[in-house]
Image (cartoon, rainbow, N blue to C red):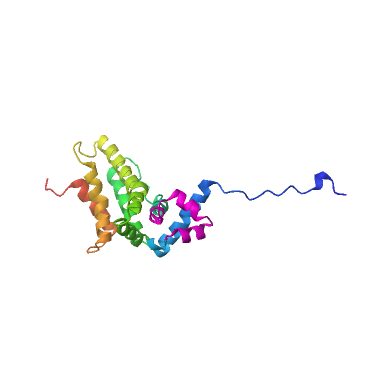
Amino acid sequence: MVTSQEQPPPRRGRGRRPAAEVRAGVLRAAADLLLGEGVKAVTFDRVAAAAGSSKVTLYKWWPSAGALAAEAYFTHSEHTLEFPDTGDLRADLTAQIRAFVRLLTEGRTGPVIAGLIGVAQTDPELSAAFSRYYSGPRRALAMATFVKARDRGELRADIDLGILVDQLWGACYHRLLIPDEPLTEDFAVALVDNALDGARVR
């Protein structure tokens, strides 16, 4: 006779996965498609199938597949583009811009970001998501770094910090999208030196 102590415990149902876990899985699946095949490969059908989720869930969280692709790209690149904060602006900028150049020139990331920028010109939802999840936060992080440097006396008090952001990262995007000149780490170092030292003879 089997006693109650010998009975196996009742099996628990699988239940629903936590929303954060589902969202992370969807973003991973979208990033894999994006980096493997480009922005046009990121469709709700394909992402839902790869993530083991439902299209209803995807539609609930993202207004379009383009918006999902933009957030997936940010999630993929966020760690790589962390901004160092050693208290030395030139060293921190050089490290960050070099990391950015490596991200754009190694593997599939450069063509992917170029594709996202291209599609964003005619897809307002992707454009808004790109700004919200990627370019906006990156710009805010750079601006915060420049404010600290200005407060430390490393930058002029009257400098336009927004233009400084455009000079540095905009130049990298320019060489990515219009490849008349190579996008290299040597270029990144020279870019920082030019921006911080200026072009005028002193």
Q: Tell me the quarter of the picture where residue 161 sits.
A: top left
- Specify whether residue 67 is painted magenta: yes
**123 and 184: which is toward the camera:** 123
Task: Tell me: residue 141, above or below residue 105.
Answer: above
Q: Does any portion of residue 107 appear in the rendered image?
A: no
Residue at 25%, 47% in the rendered image: 165
Q: Does any portion of residue 72 appear in the rendered image?
A: yes
Q: Residue furthest top?
A: 151
Estimate the x, y position of residue 183 in percent, counting from the top left.
27, 60
On the rendered image, what quadrant is the C terminus found in?
top left
- Specify whether residue 68 is painted magenta: yes
Q: Residue furthest left?
A: 201
Q: Main secondary structure of the magenta part?
A: helix
Instruction: Tally the marks.
Output: 0
**76 and 193: which is toward the camera:** 76
Q: Tell me the quarter of the picture where residue 31 sits.
A: bottom left
In the image, taking residue 122 as reference, residue 14 lies left or right, namely: right
In the image, taking residue 39 as reference, residue 91 lies left or right, namely: left
Estimate the x, y position of residue 144 in percent, counting from the top left.
31, 40
Estimate the x, y position of residue 15 in percent, counting from the top left.
62, 49
**130 and 79: which is toward the camera:** 130
Magenta segment: 42-69
